[in-house]
Amino acid sequence: MMTIRPATDSDLPTICGIYSHARRQMALAGNPKQWGNDKPSLETIREDIRKKQSYVICIHGHLCGVFALIIGTDATYQVIEDGAWLNDKPYGTLHRIAGNGQVHGIFAAVSSFCESKLETDGIQNIRIDTHEDNRIMQHLLVEYGYTKCGRIYVEDHTPRIAYQKEFSV
């Protein structure tokens, strides 16, 4: 059974290993540019943990995945091109999701966890973005009810496909 808990500093080596594996898998799947060889950075991972917005997915106590859930306005989502957000209501943003490659169903567990956590705070929306070469994530987003909304640009000014899911509280 998968469990999800906040990440801690002691999880850092395993988290870094999961992200390293994810970068290799993304490159093999035709998506070498989204995270390159160094994203997310160690500084970003540490900051996610410090801000208590980093979570780990565990099976029988062993870490098998990681993600960040950020509640509040995301600066990179302020401008959207070639479309529009579903609404302007408060939202959470799902970032930096990755698995160790040994466990299936991570996205389903993360999506369900995020929706429940956001509902607790009265938030009915979740946003996420992905690189145009990340066909696997695009497929998962559509499969789990996310709507493609347009294009946004991340910090390094590269484009991403933006998605949003509205759910009821």
Image: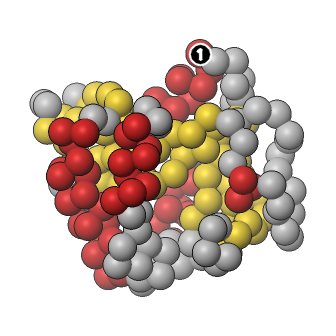
Q: Can you say which quadrant of the picture contains the C terminus?
A: top right
Inspect this view and state whether residue 110 appears. Answer: no
Q: How is the image coloured?
A: secondary structure
Is residue 34 at all visible to an observer of this figure? yes
Q: Can you give x and y, in whole percent of width and height, for residue 124 in the image? A: 71, 28
Horizontal placement of 112 versus 123: left or right? Answer: left
14 is higher (above) or lower (below) than 56: below
**Which amino acid lies under the numbered mark 1 shown in the image of this protein?**
Thr
Residue 166 location (% of width, % of height): 72, 36
Residue at image location 61% in from the left, 59% down from the top: 129
Is 155 on the left-hand or right-hand side of 45? right
Residue of label 1: 120
Quarter location, residue 102 = bottom left
Residue placed most toward the observer, 154 or 63: 154
Q: Residues within 10 Å of mark 1 (few under 14, many from 20)?
A: few
Q: Quadrant of residue 141?
A: bottom right
Relative side of 35 to 141, left or right: left
Q: Residue at x 69, y 18 (%)?
A: 122
- Residue at 61% of width from left, 52% of height from top? 128
Q: Locate the N terminus by quadrant.
A: top left
Q: How many marks?
A: 1
Where is residue 73, by image quadrant? top right
Under tag 1, what secondary structure? helix
Give the residue at x 76% y 32%.
Answer: 90
